Amino acid sequence: METTLTPAPAASAPASLKTTPMLQLRDIEKVYQTDTIETVALNRVNLTINKGEFVSIMGPSGCGKSTLLSLMGLLDEPTGGVIEIDGRAVTSYSDKELARVRNHKIGFIFQSFHLINDLSVLDNVELPLLYRAGLSSKERRQRAQQALERVGLSARTRHFPSQLSGGQRQRVAIARALAGAPEIILADEPTGNLDSVMGEEIMELLLSLNRDQGTTVVMVTHDENMAHKTERLIRFFDGSQVS
Amino acid sequence: MIRHLFTLIWNRKRSNFLLISEILLSFFVLFAVSSLLVSSYYNYRQPAGFAYDNVWEVNVSPSQDTASRKEMLQLMLQRLQATPGVVAVTRTSSNTPFSFSSMNTNEFYYQKKQGPLTDRYDADDEMQKVLRQNVVAGRWFERRDDASTRRPVVVNQEFAKALFGSEPAVGKVLSNDKGIESWQVVGVIDAYRRGSDFDGNNPAVFERHVLEGADRFDPNDRPNLLVRVQAGSGAVLEQRLVKEIQDVTKGWHATVTTLDESRHDKMKIVLTPLIALGVVSLFLIVNVALGLFGVLWYNINQRRAEIGLRRALGATGAGIGGQFLGEMLVVTTLGVLAGVILAAQFPLLGVFGVPTTVYVLAILLAAVLIYVLTAICAFQPSRIAAGIQPAVSLREE
C-alpha cells in the first residue's frame, strides 16, 4: 500500500489571499417542484469562500449540503440568487461557458470516487484535460503523470480502478481533480466510503494541497473529526446556514 | 478525443463485440441486397443488343396431323413475309426474347479449351433483319452459308472474350468434346440480353438452321416465329396474320403477342422476387435498427454517472451527445471494416461472375446505409445523454 505523499512543489497561499473572495453565494434558493410537492432544499443562503480557505460543511442528511455543493460546482442552477466565482456572476452563463468554468477553475472529488472502470488510472486522471483546448496529447500525459506523482500513485498508471483499494481510488480521484490545476476543489464526503486510516490519509492529502498549494477546498462531511481539521466549519439545517 | 474514444471502445471490447457483430451482419445483408440492386441497375443500363419494338411473336399450335407439315410451314412463312405491313419473318428456337424458355450448353471447345456455359439459339438468315442485332465483326448468316462444310455460328462478345481472349473471333473453328470440328464463327454481335432488362450479357451462340436442310428445325416442333412489322401496325395486321396462318395450315391455331408486352410481363415477374427480397431486408434492417436503438438506450442509462462526471469535468451537453454519436460511429467503423474485408473477397475471387464495379458500388452503398442507420439510431439516445442533468446523475450511483 502506498501512503507516501510527494511534497507539493508550490508555496503556501499568502495570508492576504485569504481575504479575497473565491466563491460567493448571494440569496441562493433551490426549490424542487413536482406536480404536487414543493421542496425547499436551500433557503436564502449567503456564503463567501475566500481564496486559499479550507471550509467544511456539516449537517444532517437532507439538509441541503450536496445541493449546495452542486450549485457551487455549477452542476445545477439555483431557483433564485446569484453565484459569483472569482468575482464574476455565472448565473446567466451558457452551457458552454459553465463547462469552461468547471473545467478550468473547479475540481471535484466524490464520495464514491466516480472513476470510469474501463479506463486506466492515467486515462481517468487525464479526463478533465481532454475537455481543455490547446493541450497536446503529450502535455496531457505529462500533467496527468505529475498529478499521480503528487498523490503517490505514479506506479499505478496502467492499473484499472477495479485493481485498486478504496483509498487508492480516492487518490486517483484527487489526482484527476488536481490535473486541471483548479483554483477550488469541491469534495463531497471524500472520506465517507473509506475506513478511518484511509480517511485520515485522504484528509492529510487535502490539507497539504490547501496548505502547500493554496488551493481553496470546500468539503462536505459527516465526520466531526475531519471537519475540525479545517479552517472554517459551516453547519446547515433544513436548507439554511445555522453557523 | 478520437484516441480516447478508441481506447474506451477497445477497453469495452467484450461488451462492444455483440454490437460490432450485429453491425457486421447488417452490413452483409445490405451488401447482398445492394449487390443485387446495383447489378440489376447496371444490367438495366446496358444495351439489350437487339430491337424489340415493332416485333411480334407468333406462336403457332399445329394440328395433330403431321403430314405435309414442312411444306405448310414453308408456305406459311412465305405468306407472312408477303403480307403488307410485315418487314421480316424469322423462325427461331423456343427461347425467344423475354420467354421463360432457355437452352444452354458448354459443349463448345476451342483448341481443347472448353467454352463457358453458353445460351444457344437457333437462327436463320432473316433473324438479324427482325431483331437487328448489332454485328461488330464479320457478318450475319447468308444464303452462301448453305455451302459451308461446318455449321456457321454467330457469337456475342462475351462468348468471344471468354474463349478467344483478345484474338479475333471471326473464322475460328469450334469443336465438340470429342474434338470434332463442327462450327465456324462467321460473325460477332456486341450483346444479346434476351432474358429481361435485368439480365446480364451471358455468352451466346446463334447456330444457323434453315428449314430446307436436315437440321435441328424439326418440322414437328411448334413453330416459333418472330415478325418485324411496320411501325404503327395494330390489331388489323394481327388479325390478318392469324387469318393467313389459318388459311395456309387449315386450322392451325395462332396467337400473337408483341415483344414489348412480353418484356413488361417478364419485368413484373422478375421484379416481384426483388421487391419481396427488398421488403424482407427492410424488415430485417428495421429489427436491427430497433436492436441498436435499444442497446444504445440501455448503454446510456448504464452510463448516467459517467455522463454526470464528464459534465462535471468540463464537457458540454452537446459534447456528451457528440461523444455518444462518435462512439457509435467508431463501433460502426469497426463492424464495417470487418464487413468490407469479407465483402472484398467477392470481387477478388470473381464470385458469380459479377463485374468488380458492381461489388465496389454495393460495398460503398452498404457502408453508407449502415452509417446512416447507426447515426439515426444513435441520434435520439445521444440527445437524451446530452440532456442528462449532471447533479442528478452524479447522485444516482
Image (cartoon, helix red, strand yellow):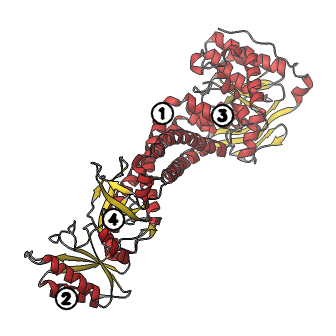
Q: Secondary structure at mark 3?
A: helix
Name the amino acid, label 2.
Lys
Q: Nearer the viewer, mark 4 or mark 3?
A: 4
The image quadrant where one finds the N terminus of chain B is top right
- Distance CA(mark 1)–CA(mark 4): 61 Å
Q: Residues within 10 Å of mark 4 (few under 14, many from 20)?
A: many
Per the image, the residue denoted by label 2 is B243
Which residue corresponds to the image point at 14% horizontal and 80% vertical from the top-left?
B252
**Mark 2 on the same chain as mark 3:** yes
Q: Nearer the viewer, mark 2 or mark 1?
A: 2
Q: Position of residue B315 (x, y in %)?
A: 68, 39
Name the amino acid, label 4.
Pro
Which residue corresponds to the image point at 47% horizontal and 58% vertical from the top-left?
B168
Residue B3's disc number: 3
Marked residue chain, label 3: B
Q: Nearer the viewer, mark 2 or mark 3?
A: 2
Name the amino acid, label 1.
Phe
Name the amino acid, label 3.
Arg
Residue A111 at least partly seen: yes
- Distance CA(mark 2)–CA(mark 1): 72 Å
Marked residue chain, label 1: B
Q: Residues within 10 Å of mark 3 (few under 14, many from 20)?
A: few
Label located before the other in sequence (2 or 1) = 1
Per the image, the residue denoted by label 4 is B152
